[in-house]
Image: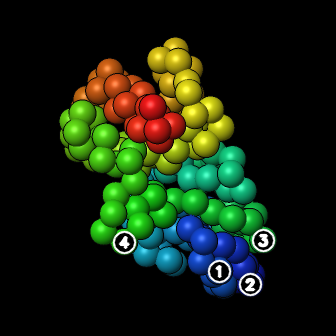
Amino acid sequence: MAKHHVSFTINGDPTEILCETHATLLDVLRDELELTGTKEGCSTGDCGACSVTVDGRLVCSCLMLGVEANGKAIGTVEGLAKGDKLHVLQEKFLEHHALQCGICTPGFLVASKALLEKNPDPTETEVRYWLAGNLCRCTGYDKIVRAVMDAATVMRGA
């Protein structure tokens, strides 16, 4: 199987790999780069567990080929915290008990961050709409929505 040289930025760090043509970005992140925070849920783009940002746009990494990431800026859940300092979204997810098994949590965090970067003062309806592509089978969605709303308030400095 042919491999292609791919270079991109992951969470601000320049990265180069040899990537098989058929490997998804999810496969590259988990298997090649050992960034296992991004989860595989459905492999069909229906659950949002594998959500990452590509050039600031929210995408399901199971639906994108790794070679398509060439020259792009990729953001994963590992890029949220700064060392031991959790991102406010991570803090609020813990505070509001917005996680249980954890499979969906990285996708929700990445999607929530993408939302708040685009709209720092969303309504509850906007949060629910934005996160509609992320599925959770454990917590229900109310705690997640509350955590995002609370994080938005903190991030705005309100």
Number of marks in picture:
4
Counting from the top left corner in percent of width and height, residue 69 is at 72, 66
Counting from the top left corner in percent of width and height, residue 20 is at 66, 76
Lower position in the chain sequence, tag 3 or tag 2: 2
How packed mark 4 is, by other alpha carbons closer than 10 Å (few <14, some 14-19, many 20 or more), is few
Q: The residue tagged with tag 2: helix, strand or loop?
A: strand
Counting from the top left corner in percent of width and height, residue 139 is at 25, 29
Quadrant of res 95: top left
The residue wearing badge 4 is 83
90 on left or right of 113:
left
Lower position in the chain sequence, tag 3 or tag 4: 3
Q: In 3D space, how far apart are the residues under numbered discs 3 and 1 (Cα atoms)? A: 10 Å
The residue wearing badge 2 is 5
- Nearer the observer, disc 3 or disc 2? 3
For the residue marked with disc 4, what is the amino acid?
Answer: Gly
- Residue at x 76%, y 71% (from the top left corner): 70
For the residue marked with disc 2, what is the amino acid?
Answer: His
For the residue marked with disc 3, what is the amino acid?
Answer: Gly
The residue wearing badge 3 is 71
Q: In 3D space, how far apart are the residues under numbered discs 1 and 4 (Cα atoms)? A: 18 Å
- Nearer the observer, disc 4 or disc 2? 4
The residue wearing badge 1 is 14
